[in-house]
Image (spheres, rainbow, N blue to C red):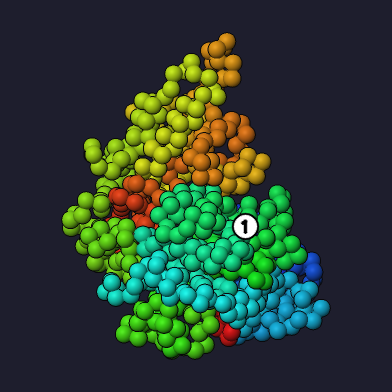
Amino acid sequence: MSRSFADLLPTPLGDQSLSGLAPLSRVDDLLLLLECWVERGWLRALDRAFVGFLSGLDAEADPLVLLAAALTSHQLGHGHVCLDLHETLKAPDFALSLPPEGDVQNTPMLLPSQLLVALDGDAWCRALAASLLVAQADDFSDAGMSKPLVLSGERLYLRRYWTYERRIDAALRQRLAQQEAAPKDLAQRLDSLFGKAGSNLQIDWQKLACAIATRGAFSIITGGPGTGKTTTVVRLLALLQAPAVQSGTPLRIRLAAPTGKAAARLTESISQQVLSLDVSEEVRQKIPSEVTTVHRLLGSRPGTRHFRHHAGNPLPLDVLVVDEASMIDLEMMANLQDALPSHARMVLLGDKDQLASVEAGAVLGDLCRDAEVGRYSPQTQAWLQSVSGEDLSQSELQTGDQAREPLAQQVVMLRYSRRFGEGSGIGQLSRLVNSQQDSQARALLNARSHDDLFALALKGEQDKALEHLLLDGHGSGGPQGYRYYLSVLAQERPQASAPLENPCWSQWGRKVLEAFDAFQLLCAVRKGAWGVEGLNLRITAALDQAGLINSDQPWYEGRPVLMTRNDYGLGLMNGDIGITLSLPELDYAKTGKQVLRVAFPRNDGSGGVRFVLPSRLNDVETVYAMTVHKSQGSEFAHTALILPEALNPVLTKELIYTGITRAKHWFSLIEPRQGVFEEALQRKVKRLSGLMLGLSKA
């Protein structure tokens, strides 16, 4: 018989005046509540459909089980791999991010905290353990493997995501157990690339990262902006490739990144770095500079979750480097591990303190949990000193916690930023934010002592100071606003008589795209006056009023657009940015007509541009404002971050840190209300998963 919810709810909560629903005593009542949550935008239709599927599998399913399933599916949409039952019950509304951003309706709705107020976590776990729909984590029987939900301690998973975790866990255990043969002359090779130890009072973490990566099949190099991740990996590739070339068997090396823009940035950076390497021309030629997207690397099959490369058809490579690894979600990491040949090395690069992937999982953050403190064993420290000359015994690193030792030995954190040094306001602010020192961060902003930091406190929603900043930046010669790219568009336009195939159009498109990168407004949220949707409309209107664009039609010259989904037919990836330009028709000489096309950068390192007709772009949105999540993998000369006027579940120190570190030269903080910045810094992203729990037993 189905368990009754009536005994779980205080009497007033069953009152129709509060929830509009009768007391939840049957599965039908639960389904009705979930329908209301879907209509209100609290749950996805997918979450409700999943519960309907489960109730079809088990007509006698306990409502507690179905509710847990709905919430587990809901949490996946918020990036959590699983539902932690006990943690959820501590603060249900906060844990589940309900009500969601943008819920402004006044109609009363039953909250998760009201629904679950009298529920005991152990009782919830017992109900799940007794269900025909739920398998225990250690049940590998055919019957157990066929169940759609998995209970591991106090964590509930959808079967697919439990499987992803286990696949990654198994692959990393195997790779961490593999000891690769480092070159016999490793010490000499390291010295030739980095110089001898002792020439710098600071520990050379780049040198140590290269050393560690030579001895294992899996390694991670993490660090903030400007700490030299790209420089390190280029020297690592030289370190690995040189002896292979000398032996006549060059390594097959591939480089990948999650987005097209991140791939293009790394391609450009590596191309420059390789030229400066002190290696033979033969070795230099064998170090690739072309970076592809992870999807292209694996060989996406449109319309499916499957790839051309997998365990049965592994990637033809010996070394794989993945940049911006913080953006790799659990499913993609499982697919990468599956497709990697058993003999190959994998090196992950990324900033562990950035926001995690948009999809479920925080793989890099999980794997780098001990990066700050090191946890290198005495054996590792002795080996590192023998090959690099760097003595870690005098550092403040921790050496205990044997449980996580195998993984910790292969993770290196780069600690010294060359882009944001001690004199950099952006660097100081990002470090204060990362360490959650809100009062010091506020004092730095208020001091106005650094030319690269600005703060704008708005006086109400209609404060025109916002338009002035977004259009003009902070004055001539300083940080730019959106007027700049539109002035480049107008002033650099080629003669209309030039045929479309003339390179001048591509060069013009590239200049406009580069000018657009001079400024970007980032938002924490999508909805509301301070979200992406409202601000894109506001900026469009301001630019139109200033005579800089003519937005009478949906497509107009100067409109910047962001790809919101991969389009393999066009070769455009989610996150790519294009600018709408007016170009001559192919038969312009006869007709004198022009047509709108969208210029996108070619993400192949060529510096070229591709032009696409707007009618072929189905998944795009205007991008004067974008979310901080969408900005990952990008950099802008001047970045402005605007916060909402009320604390929101997405506002965390990771989001603020990521927004700040998208800026190369200038950063502006825009605040509709004082205090939200400080409140956000007190909160950290806590993505729920069991990945480290499994690896800690390696």
Left or right of 676 in this view: 384? right
Residue extending furthest top? Answer: 590
Above or below residue 537? Residue 311 is below
Q: Can residue 661 be seen in this snapshot?
A: yes
Q: Give the x, y percent position of residue 48.
A: 67, 61
Tag 1: residue type?
A: Arg
Nearer to the camera, 323 or 334: 323
Residue shown at the point (63%, 78%) measured from the top left: 174
Q: Give the x, y percent position of residue 602.
A: 53, 41
Nearer to the camera, 40 or 314: 314
Q: Give the x, y percent position of residue 14.
A: 59, 70
Q: Can residue 176 be seen in this snapshot?
A: no
Nearer to the camera, 594 or 498: 498
Residue shown at the point (74%, 83%) measured from the top left: 139
Left or right of 333 in this view: 146? right
Residue bearing the label numbered 1: 44
Tell me the quarter of the image containing the N terminus.
Answer: bottom right
Left or right of 313 in this view: 217? left
Q: Residues within 10 Å of mark 1 (few under 14, many from 20)?
A: some
Nearer to the camera, 200 or 315: 200
Mark 1: secondary structure: loop
Residue 78 in which image quadrant: bottom right
